[in-house]
Image (cartoon, grey):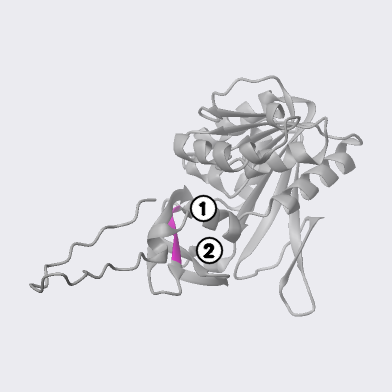
């Protein structure tokens, strides 16, 4: 990101050095780095996928396709996990894929690098050899706001899996998910701001933004923008089954003694009417 240059008027006093404004932190910060520090937890994702695939199928998954992969941090996490693991990341944003190559793939060792492939393609049309796992995280699959389009995506994912393959994805909801609101989370050196800017109850369409605020008063507004349809869990399950998956499991997060999410997701047939929740989903071919 370039630093803004500020023009100053001459003081009229020969030889006096002109003061230059110190660059703001928002001008210097890397939005992808901030996103990963705020939102992603690839060690959790790896453990969840690896453990539950083995629990369901009785074998170890080695071939992963990450849809809407962004910086491909999870792809790199996957190939570091085992020497047999291979990953393909798919995204339509060339800039974020280039960032992932420069920051994550470049950091892999010589054995790991060839086991990651990044593709600039539509997740509905990409053609690769069948994989054990397709991963669709961070709710990006909600960009398909027409029900038939989302079912078509799910069906294409099913076709891309091996015979006992599994789709893993996440979802969010709760009564606060329908509110127009901002939520702030402090991190070292910056504050992550999640804004639910608008929600239309007739269509289910919502617009959300991620902003970053810094302790020098500067702000990176709308670093990331999202236009989604907020689907309910019953809708998601019905669409996955309609797309041909044989079994769909919802994993509900527990709570610790301080009434905070404990990060442990267990299979569940019932949930709680929490103000805000995140759950995991598996769909078996």
Q: Which of disc 2 and disc 1 is earlier in sequence?
A: 2
Residue under label 2: 177
Seen in the picture, residue 263 relative to 163 is either above or below; the reply is below
Seen in the picture, residue 204 relative to 159 is either above or below; the reply is below
Q: Is residue 208 magenta?
A: yes
Q: Is residue 31 magenta?
A: no
Assign a secondary structure to mark 1.
loop
Q: CA distance from mark 1 to mark 2?
A: 8 Å
Q: Which residues are magenta?
A: 205-212
Q: Count up the numbered dots.
A: 2
Cβ atoms at labels 1 and 2 below 8 Å apart: yes
Q: Residue at x 12, y 67 (%)?
A: 9
In the rendered structure, the answer to whether residue 189 lies left or right of residue 261 reads: left
Assign a secondary structure to mark 2.
helix
In the rendered structure, the answer to whether residue 27 lies left or right of residue 63 reads: left
User: Which percent across, then down, holds residue 217?
Assistant: 39, 74
Seen in the picture, residue 184 relative to 251 is either above or below; the reply is below
Q: Residue at x 69, y 38 (%)?
A: 108
Q: Residue furthest front?
A: 15
Residue under label 1: 230
Q: Quadrant of the C terminus?
A: top right
Snapshot quadrant of residue 69: top right
Q: Which residue is nearer to you in this view: 55 or 145?
A: 55
In the rendered structure, the answer to whether residue 251 lies left or right of residue 174 reads: right
Dot label at residue 86 = none
Q: Residue at x 57, y 24 (%)?
A: 126
């Amino acid at each position: 990101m370039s630093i803004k240059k500020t023009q100053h008027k001459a003081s009229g006093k020969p030889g006096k050095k002109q003061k230059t404004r110190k660059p703001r932190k928002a001008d210097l910060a890397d939005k992808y780095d901030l996103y990963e520090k705020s939102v992603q937890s690839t060690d959790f994702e790896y453990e969840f996928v690896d453990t539950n695939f083995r629990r369901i199928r009785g074998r170890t998954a080695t071939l992963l396709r990450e849809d809407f992969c962004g910086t491909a941090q999870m792809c790199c996490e996957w190939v570091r996990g085992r020497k047999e693991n291979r990953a393909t990341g798919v995204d339509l944003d060339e800039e974020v894929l280039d960032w992932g190559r420069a920051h994550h793939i470049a950091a892999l060792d010589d054995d790991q690098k060839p086991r990651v492939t990044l593709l600039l393609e539509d997740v509905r049309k990409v053609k690769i050899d069948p994989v054990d796992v397709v991963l669709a995280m961070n709710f990006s699959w909600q960009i398909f706001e027409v029900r038939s389009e989302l079912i078509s995506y799910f069906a294409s994912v099913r076709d891309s899996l091996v015979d006992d393959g599994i789709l893993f994805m996440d979802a969010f909801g709760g009564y606060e998910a329908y509110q127009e609101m901002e939520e702030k989370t402090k991190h070292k050196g910056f504050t992550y701001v999640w804004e639910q800017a608008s929600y239309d109850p007739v269509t289910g369409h919502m617009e959300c933004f991620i902003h970053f605020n810094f302790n020098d008063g500067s702000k990176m507004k709308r670093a990331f923008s999202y236009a989604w349809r907020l689907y309910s869990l019953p809708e998601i399950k019905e669409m996955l089954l309609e797309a041909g998956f044989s079994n769909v499991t919802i994993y509900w997060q527990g709570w610790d003694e301080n009434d905070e999410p404990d990060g442990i997701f267990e299979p569940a047939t019932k949930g709680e009417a929490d103000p805000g929740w995140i759950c995991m989903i598996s769909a078996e071919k």
